Image (cartoon, grey):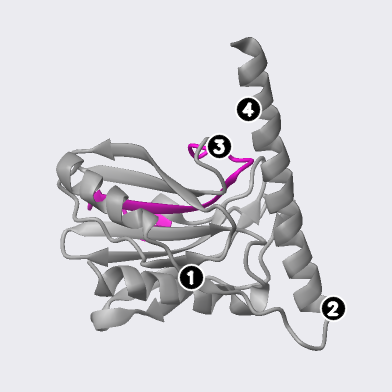
Amino acid sequence: MQIIRAFKRQKLLAMGLGLFLLGTSLVVLSRTSNRPVKAELNQFTGLNQIEKALKQQTSVPPALPRKIPDVQRSSVSILLSEEKEYKVSLDVHPDCQGATVCSFGRLEGKVLTGQTVQEEYGNPKDRSWQPLAQSPLPEKTVTLANGNQGLFIPWVCGAHCSTSKIVWDQDRYRYAIGLRGGMIPDDQELDFLVAMANSAIENK
C-alpha cells in the first residue's frame, strides 16, 4: 500500500511539473515570439456529471463553463459541496483532487455573505507587501453575458500563487472562475476568462 501511495505521489508531482513547464513555456513564447501563442478552449463534457452532483448537494445553482483550457487528460473534482457553497477543481488527472501541483483552475459558487468581492477575493493592498511575482495585467471591471458585471483579479505569488479570476454576483449568489497563472499567455488571459464566465452564465 505504501509503495502504491508513493508511486501516486511521484506521478502527481511529475504531472504538476509538466503543467508548470507548459504554463511557463506559453508565457515565454507569447513574450518572445512575433506571433503570440493561441490558447484554446475545448468542449468538456466531464462537467455535466459534476453539475448533476452539485444540484443534489447544494442550494447554490452551479455556474459551470462548458469549455475549459485545452489540457490533456483534463479531470474535475468537487472539493467542497455544502448547503451554501461549492468549490470545484480543474485538474490534469483524476487522482489530483485539487492538489496544488496538478490543479490548473477553480470554479466556485456561494450564497452572498455581505462581504465585497475585494474583501473576499482581492489581492493585498498593503504597499509594504511585495509579491515575488505577479501578472502584468491590472485589476478591472468587465461586462459579462446577460448584463452581469464582474471583477477581473490577476494572479500574484507570495507564499503561494493565486489564480487569475473573474468574480461576479448574480441574484443572491457569488461566482468565481479562476485559472492558474501561466496557463494562458498574458495577452489572452482576460479574454479567456471572460469567455469561460460567459459560458457559465449562459448555461446556468
Residue stretch in magenta: 96-119
Q: Nearer the viewer, residue 138 or 130?
A: 138
| Amino acid type at mark 2 | Thr
Question: Residue 151 lies in magenta, yes or no?
Answer: no
Q: Give the distance between the C-alpha atoms of the residues marked 1 and 2, in whole angstroms.
A: 26 Å
Residue 31, percent from left and from top: 79, 77
Residue 3: x and y in percent read 67, 14
Q: Which residue is mark 3?
A: 99
Identity of the residue furthest to the top in this view: 1
Q: Residues within 10 Å of mark 4 (few under 14, many from 20)?
A: some
How many marks can you see?
Answer: 4
Which comes before the other along the chain, label 3 or label 1? 1
The quadrant where residue 146 appears:
bottom left
User: Viewer-nearest of labels 3 and 4?
Assistant: 4
Q: CA distance from mark 3 to mark 4?
A: 12 Å
The tag on residue 8 is 4
Element at label 3: loop
Element type where label 4 sits in the image: helix
- The location of residue 115, given as percent across then percent down, is 30, 52
User: Along the polypeptide, which appears first: circle 4 or circle 1?
Assistant: 4
**N-terminal of the two: label 3 or label 4?**
4
Q: CA distance from mark 3 to mark 2?
A: 31 Å
The percent coordinates of residue 13 (x first, y second) are 70, 36
The amino acid pointed to by label 4 is Lys
- The residue identified by callout 2 is 32
Binning the other alpha carbons within 10 Å of mark 3 as few (below 14), some (14 to 19) or many (20 upward) gives some
In the image, taking residue 93 as reference, residue 196 lies left or right, namely left
In the drawing, what numbered circle is on residue 42? Answer: 1
